[in-house]
């Protein structure tokens, strides 16, 4: 049964182009244009190197850093994030000290990863293609010259170069014109399932419903798997606020907890969607098992196979009060611009200006291509 499921998912992946091995370099540089660069990291024998693509050129930077150098700092970040499991309110007297310690880790991560690339990173827009454990790094939150990268850069992510190129070719079904981009996100789907650990999920859905008045909204006992299957295929925006489970032993069974059970990665990838954006306001939705090829498993891959053009995911368990704050800013920006990357960054910048610890805003990241690239490519 599992073999049949794998074959079905692989066939669907090939249909939407995610398993394509063909990379059109000329088209890629056309898509990047003059404003953006792409960095793809690769690992060989526990040492990371990078390909840098910009201005019609491909440069290779070998032996930048070892896995051990990065892993040590990732473990420190994981430990510091774990302290918030005791509750943000209990830590409030220590937040300044905790933030300073966290920022130092982010500064050191930037130094170790980019020390040999600093002179080549002048572009305003970066597409990051991580590898292996680098998938767990919030590159947008790394610090350089006493500032977070997203204070000066537009940063997005992709599981691979070929997937990024495929996403740029997924033409938006409706032109995004007008001050409020109403046509671009005219059929939103909002689903939320709260419990004692994330009680503000219902509030989040209520707030987003006011921002997106045309949305179909499902909460509590109607936030069901069947309602997802019935409504997701026609939605141009999907927002899911619930618990998530990452199955490291078998990522195809990673899933989102709805009222009547788990919406698994296998379920998600089996139903075609047309969404310009899928937002997963849940815990650890970005984690994926890493394979040598482009077989990225987990919720990210499932939604891309299903047909999503862009995703907003999270790297670690999200404080639901912070998620409510960030998502409110994000969708207000999005309703005016239809640009998920800039809208997310602007929401995060607002929380930076309010001196929030990165724990509250840094887990969220955008996977996909900006509408600029898609317009240029078509």
Image (spheres, rainbow, N blue to C red):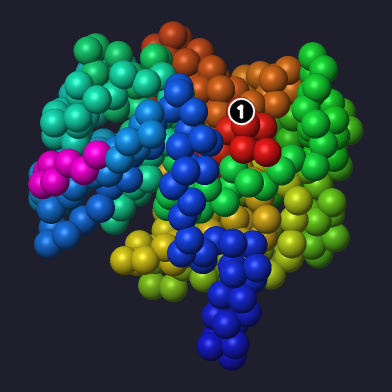
Foreground residue among 271 and 245: 271
Q: For residue 190, what is the image quadrant?
A: top right
Residue 219 appears left or right of 142: right
Residue at image position (37%, 21%) is 123
- Residue 306, horizontal then vertical, whole percent: 67, 60
> Which quadrant is home to the C terminus?
top right
Q: Residue at x 59, y 23 (%)?
A: 343
The location of residue 210, given as percent across then percent down, is: 81, 24
Relative vertical location of residue 290 with respect to residue 9 in this rendering, above or below: above
In the picture, measured across the screen, residue 219 lies left or right of residue 320, that is right
Q: Quadrant of the N terminus?
A: bottom right
> Most prominent secondary structure in the magenta stretch?
strand
Label 1 environment density (alpha carbons within 10 Å; few <14, some 14–19, many ≥20) = few
Give the mark count: 1
What is the residue that sits farthest to the top in this orientation? 353
* Front in this rendered view, residue 224 or 64: 64
Residue on which the image places disc 1:
372
Choose top left, top right, bottom left or bottom right for residue 188.
top right
What are the residue bounds of the magenta stretch? Answer: 59-65
Q: Is residue 172 visible?
A: yes
Percent coordinates x, y for residue 252 in the rendering: 52, 70
Q: Nearer the viewer, residue 26 or 275?
A: 26
Q: Residue at x 51, y 66 (%)?
A: 19
What is the secondary structure assignment of the residue under circle 1?
Answer: helix
The reply to whether the magenta stretch includes residue 140 is no
What residue appears at the point 45 percent right and 23 percent down from the top-left corner? 34
In the foreground, 49 or 189: 49
> Could one spot residue 281 in this view of the protein?
no
């Amino acid at each position: 049964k599992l073999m049949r499921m794998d074959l079905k998912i692989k066939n669907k992946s090939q249909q939407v182009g995610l398993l394509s091995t063909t990379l059109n370099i000329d088209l890629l540089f056309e898509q990047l244009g003059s404003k953006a660069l792409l960095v793809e990291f690769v690992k060989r024998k526990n040492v990371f190197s990078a390909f840098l693509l910009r201005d019609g050129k491909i440069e290779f930077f070998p032996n930048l850093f070892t896995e051990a150098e990065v892993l040590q700092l990732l473990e420190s970040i994981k430990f510091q994030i774990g302290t918030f499991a005791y509750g943000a309110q209990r830590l409030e007297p220590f937040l300044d000290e905790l933030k300073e310690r966290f920022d130092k880790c982010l500064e050191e991560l930037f130094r170790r990863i980019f020390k040999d690339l600093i002179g080549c990173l002048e572009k305003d827009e970066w597409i990051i293609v991580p590898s292996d454990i680098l998938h767990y790094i919030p590159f947008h939150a790394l610090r350089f010259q006493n500032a977070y990268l997203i204070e000066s850069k537009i940063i997005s992510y992709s599981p691979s170069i070929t997937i990024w190129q495929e996403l740029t070719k997924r033409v938006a079904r409706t032109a995004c014109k007008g001050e409020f981009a109403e046509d671009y996100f005219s059929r939103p789907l909002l689903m939320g399932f709260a419990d004692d650990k994330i009680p503000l999920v219902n509030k989040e859905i209520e707030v987003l419903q006011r921002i997106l008045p045309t949305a179909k909204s499902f909460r509590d006992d109607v936030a069901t798997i069947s309602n997802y299957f019935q409504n997701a295929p026609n939605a141009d925006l999907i927002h899911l606020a619930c618990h998530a489970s990452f199955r490291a032993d078998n990522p195809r069974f990673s899933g989102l907890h709805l009222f009547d059970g788990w919406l698994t990665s296998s379920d998600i990838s089996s139903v075609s969607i047309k969404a310009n954006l899928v937002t997963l306001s849940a815990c650890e939705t970005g984690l994926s098992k890493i394979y040598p090829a482009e077989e990225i498993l987990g919720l990210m891959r499932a939604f891309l196979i299903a047909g999503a053009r862009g995703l907003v995911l999270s790297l670690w368990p999200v404080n639901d009060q912070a998620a409510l704050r960030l998502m409110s800013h994000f969708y207000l920006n999005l309703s005016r611009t239809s640009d998920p990357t800039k809208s997310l960054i602007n929401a995060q910048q607002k929380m930076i200006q309010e001196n929030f610890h990165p724990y509250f805003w840094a887990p969220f990241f955008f996977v996909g291509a900006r509408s600029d690239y898609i317009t240029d490519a078509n």
